[in-house]
Image: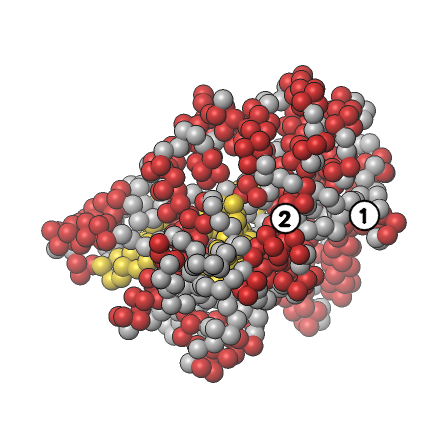
Amino acid sequence: MASSALKQASATPPTLQESQTAALLTLLNLNNPVESPANSVQSAAKGTTALKVAAPTGPPVWKVLVLDQYTKDVLATVLRVQDLRDVGVTLHVQLHSNRPPLPDVPAVYFVSPTLANIRRISQDLEKGLYESFHLNFVEPLSRALLEDLAAAVAKDGTGELVEQVLDQYLSFIAPSPSLFSLVPPPPNTSTAATPNAVAGPSAPSLPHSTYAILNSPASTEQQIEEEIERVATGLFSVVVTMGHVPIIRAPRGNAAEMIAKKLEQKVRDAILSSARSHTSSLFAQDASGLSNLQRPLLLILDRNIDLVPMLSHGWTYQALASDCLEMKLNRVVVSQPQKRSYDLDSKDFFWAKNAANPFPQVAEEINTELDRYKQDAAEITRSTGVSDVNDIAQMDLSANAAHLKTAITALPELTARKAILDTHMNIATALLEEIKRRGLDELFSTEEAISKQSAQAILEFLRNPKADVHPTPVDKLRLVLVWYLSVPDNAISKDDIAELEKELKAAGADVSAFEYVRRTREISKMTAPSALGGSSTPVPGSSTPGGELFKGFSALSNRLTDRLKDGGLENLISGVKNFLPANKLLPVTRLTEALMDPSAASNQSLQETDDYLFLDPRAPRNPNAGLGISGVGAPGSGAGGGSGRSRRMAFSEGIVFVVGGAGYVEYGNLEEWAKKTGKRVTYGGTEIVDPGGFVRVLESLGKASS
C-alpha cells in the first residue's frame, strides 16, 4: 500500500475531472475498481482516455444503467456512449420512464437520493425488473430515506435482489480538468422555487441561482438554510473525490462563512466515524500516511467580493464561447447558419490547448493545425499512391503491405483530428461574426482600461458606436455596470447615474439590474477599486508580441472568405491591436495568491486574508469555536487558534469555490496565475454562469427588491 502511495505522490496527482471519471467508471463496473490510479495518472496527459477499466478476465458483464435527470448531467459531462459500452453498459434509461423488464440482466442505478426515486426503485424491485440491483446515490442517502427503502424491501421480500447500496459523493459537474460546478437541485425542492418567486412574470425560464436565493429579500430563512446545506453537501462531494482533507479559509460574515463551517463539520464527522467504526476513510489518500505532507487549501468566497468578471466582456476562446454562444455542460450550440451543437470534451485536443488563449491566437492555431493535418494527409496519400485520403479503400491491394498498414493505422486518428478542426472552424466563424456585429473587441478594450474612463467617455461610447457595430442593450448595460463597480465613489455623481440610466433605457435595456447593483453598493460599499482590481492598465501591444497574437486573424479570414463575403479582418483588429489582455490579477486571483503564496502577495491582500476564518477539520476543536466567539485577544482566531499572521502558509494545491456562481473570465485569470507560479488550482462555483445569465439574475433581484 505504502509503495503505491509513494508512486502516486511522485506522479502528478489526478485532476478533479480525472478523479470523477475514475469514480464513475468504477461505479459502472459494479464498483470493482478501475486500473490502479498510479497507472492512470501517468497517462493522464491523454485526458480521460487514460481512465480505462482494468481488462476483465472474461467477457464484460453486460448491464443496464438507470439514471435520473441530474445524474445524467454528471455522467454526460465526462463520459461518451462509447465509454459506457467499454464497461459493458448496453442500455441507459431514465428512472421515471416505462422500462421493459430484463430479468436476466443486472442493473446499475445512479440517481439522486429523493423520496420519489426511492419509491420508484421499490416498485422496480417489487416487479423484479432486473436480475440484481446495484443502487448508487449521487450524494449521501439520508437515514429516513434509507429506512423507507429498507421497509419497502422487507414488505415485498425483495432483499436478495439488492446487491449494493452506496453513497457516491459525485454531485458536481466537471466540464474541464480544473473547473467544476454543483449539480442543481431537483425541481421539487423548496429552494428551487425561489428564483421564480423573485423574478416576476418571466420567472419560469430562470435556471436555479444560488446568488438569487442568498440575496433576494423574498427568500425565507428556511430556503437560505436549505441552500447553504445543499452547497456544503455538494462541496463535500468535491473534497471526497479529491481525496485530501483540505485546510478551509473563508471571509467572515457572509454565506461563505456558513458554508465553510458546515463543510468542516461534515469532514470532521466523516473522519471521526471512519475512525470509530474502523472502516476505510472516505479520504482515500489519507490511508497512505502522506496526507499531511501536502494538504490542499480550500478557499470559499462570496460572489459579492467581485461582480465585475461575471459581467465583463472576455477575449479568450472559452469566455467568448460562453458569452456569444449557448454553452451548457460541454455542449456548444451554434445557431447560424443552421443550428448545430458540438461537444467540447476532454478528448478534444484543440479545446484543451486553446480554451484559455486570446481569440486571435486561437485563429492562428486553427490555421497551423489545418496545415499540419494537410501535410499528414498528403504524406499518407503520397506513400500509398491514392489521390485522396478518403480513397484509401480503393487502394491497389497488391501495393506495398507496409504502406497499407500505415495508412489504415493513421486513418482513424486523422479523421478524428479533421472532425475536431471542423468543429472549431465553425465555432470560430460564429464567434467572429458576433465580435464584428456587437463590437466585442471595442467593449473588451474599453473595459480593460475601465478605471481610466470618465462617465462622459462611457456615455459617448453608448451614444455613438462605430459604424456597422451594434452592441446589444445587454452589452451596453454590462459596460455601465463594469464601469460603475470599478470607479471610486468620488468619481460618480448623481447626474452621471441619471444620464447613464436614461441612455440605457433609450437603448432598450432593463435597468433594474443597475438599480440593484447601486443599492448593494450603497449598503455595503463593497467595491473600493483596490478590492476590484480595477486599477489595472491595458498593456500596449508594443511591449508584448502583439503582432504574433493578431496575425492569426488575417489567416483565419482567408479561410473564411467564402463564408464571410467581406474578406479581411484588418478593420476588426485595428481597434483592438494594442489591447492584449492586461497582465493583472482579478480580486479572486489576488486573494488566492495571498493565501497560497503569501511571500509574493501584496500587503493589502495579506491584511485582508489574515482575518479570514481558518478551519482545519483534522485539528482538535478549539473550545471557543463552537460558541461562535473568537479566542480572547487574538483577532480572528477561529477553529485553528493563533493570530492571522501566524497562519500564513504556502500551498502548492488549492480549490477556489465561489458561492453565487463562477465565470470563465475569472477562471481564465486564475488559471493563468496558476500556470505562471506552478500552482495547481481547481476553480468552481455553485453554478457556471454566462454574463447574460448573470445580468438576468441581477434583474430579477432588482425587481424583487423594488
The residues tagged by marks 1 and 2 sit, at their Cα atoms, a distance apart of 19 Å
Question: Which residue occupies the extreme right position in the image?
Answer: 542
Q: Amino acid at mark 1?
A: Val
The secondary element bearing badge 2 is classed as helix
Residue at horizontal 45 percent and vertical 21 percent from the top:
201
Q: Position of residue 603 (x, y in %)?
A: 66, 56
Say whether residue 149 is left or right of residue 607. Answer: left
The secondary element bearing badge 1 is classed as loop
In the foreground, 272 or 63: 272
In the foreground, 481 or 148: 481
Say whether residue 466 is left or right of residue 591. Answer: right
Q: Position of residue 661 (x, y in %)?
A: 52, 43
Residue at horizontal 59 percent and vertical 52 percent from the top:
608
Say whether residue 107 is left or right of residue 6. Answer: left
Within-10-Å neighbours for mark 2: few <14, some 14–19, many 20+: many
Residue at horizontal 30 percent and vertical 60 percent from the top:
166
Residue 228 seen anywhere in this rendered image of the structure:
yes
Sequence-first disc among 1 and 2:
1
Say whether residue 246 is left or right of residue 487. Answer: left
Q: Which mark is residue 539?
A: 1
Residue 508: which quarter of the image?
top right
Question: Which residue occupies the extreme front position in the image?
Answer: 633
In the foreground, 203 or 627: 627
Q: Mark 2 — residue?
A: 587
Q: Amino acid at mark 2?
A: Pro
Residue at horizontal 27 percent and vertical 59 percent from the top:
165
Q: Position of residue 419 (x, y in %)?
A: 64, 50
Quarter the N terminus occupies: bottom left
Q: Position of residue 85 (x, y in %)?
A: 43, 58
